Image: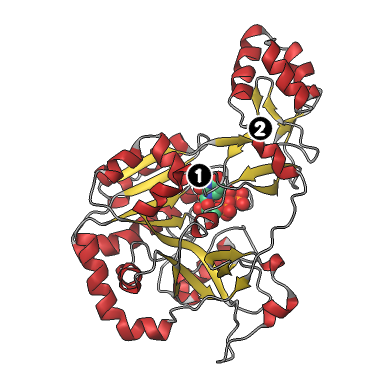
Amino acid sequence: MQENILDILKEKEQFHIIEHLESLSEKEAAKLTEQIEAIDWTFLDYLKESPKKSSVIEPIPALQIKDIDNMSETYKTIGSKAIKDGKLCLLLLAGGQGTRLGHDKPKGAYNMGITKDLYIFELLIEHTMDVVKMTDTWIHMYIMTSDINYHDTISFFKEHNYFGYNPDFLHFFVQELNPATDFDGRLLLSSRDSLALSPNGNGGWFSSLKRCGLLDTILSSDMEWINVFSVDNVLQRIADPIFLGATIHSKKMCGSKVVYKASAEEKVGAICKENGKPHIIEYYELSKDMMYQTNEDGSLAYGYGVILNYLFPIHRLKETLDIKMPLHVVKKAVPYINSTGELITPTEPNAYKFETLALDLIHEMDDCLVYEVSREKEFAPVKNRVGVDSVDTARELLSKNGYTL
Ligand code: UTP
């Protein structure tokens, strides 16, 4: 075993891996060693208690639906022109593992139909096609997958003839992986010669775009805005010209679609300001006072929940490339092999994953247009199979919006 790898593993208290390496053939050990060498160990720092930084949290005003409706024609004209001029591209975040849904294929390949096929990817492409047809302009869509679902995602699109989208405008790329650990910070193995590696979260898409060379093409084009969205909101409007127009018109640096909370206690991240910068505060970080605090008109001061649909200016994102995105430690169910080599597939969280989050990019912007959309018309997340934010609730909302399932 290489001396330096041994030293690192000792320093990081990964004694079980040292022991395991000794039991491997040369070929197996070489593969595992290569993975270990690629690790950026700073992720382990996130398991340590870090001192709370002091911050001033304040509400941020939102552009409400009624204000948007009054100006919609103006915004639409501005947004449509920008699209026609090739200023907008799209970024679909599809690298997640969808563990809560429990589907063994990419989440986008989940069939929302009941009497016919209606896949999540199909719905997202349909929504985009509405704008393509309206503006008579193909819009480049970058689709982030992980190593784990890359081939399945591409084959699925091919098999379905890209759901009618122009394949020259669809670009698939892969995000990086981070190791997962048990609750004591010990690396997990997914097989004898491989660590349990998981996608590194949805915040690393911009640096992944750079790493795979696609950013250079974007930077040498006319594109100025990037609309980032998640795979699992089946009702969202993508490349929404009104949202784009409103963001450009506002002269704010970026835009975030939000929905007004269903109740003060709803468990969603609320948009606000932290030390003067746009910020997303998690529901569990809100004090009771803040949770129920109201504006003059009686609405909740921290009442706008983010739905993971953002507009970012590409020039500003470029400046954030040198910033190391913080990692968030999340508890997830991660399959692993135990000390006797048996593969364990837990149903409850057993591991920490280390993820960057798209919402941290918002904090790197000077200001943000908080853009309210109707929950019933634009927010149907598919997170779980049943219950809250599930296939069932999303199907109900799709039906209410006129879809035949
Ligand atoms: P979620 O936070 O819902 O995570 O992702 P998930 O992995 O899809 O699902 P669970 O938590 O395991 O059930 C929100 C969005 O971010 C993308 C997802 O594909 C989804 O569009 N995402 C998440 C990535 O692209 N990469 C990641 O590493 C994680």
Q: Quick one: label 2, few (<14), some, or many (20+) residues within 10 Å?
A: few
Mark 1 CB within 8 Å of ligand 1: yes
Between 208 and 197, the one nearer to me in the picture:
208
Residue 382 percent coordinates (x, y): 55, 60
Between 259 and 191, the one nearer to me in the picture:
259
Tell me the residue that label 2 is attached to. Answer: 41
Kind of residue at disc 1: Gly
Kind of residue at disc 2: Trp
The residues bearing labels 2 and 1 have C-alpha atoms spaced at a distance of: 22 Å
Residue 403 percent coordinates (x, y): 41, 69
Which residue shows up at 40% across the image and 86% down it?
A: 66
140 over 67 or under it: above or below: above
Mark 1, secondary structure of its residue = loop
Inspect this view and state whether residue 341 appears. no
Task: State which quadrant residue 70 falls in.
Answer: bottom left
Q: Are marks 2 and 1 in contact (CB under 8 Å)?
A: no
Tell me the residue that label 1 is attached to. Answer: 95
**Residue reaching furthest bottom?**
297
**Does 113 sit left or right of 179 as displayed?**
left
Inspect this view and state whether residue 358 appears. yes
Nearer mark to the viewer, of 2 and 1: 2
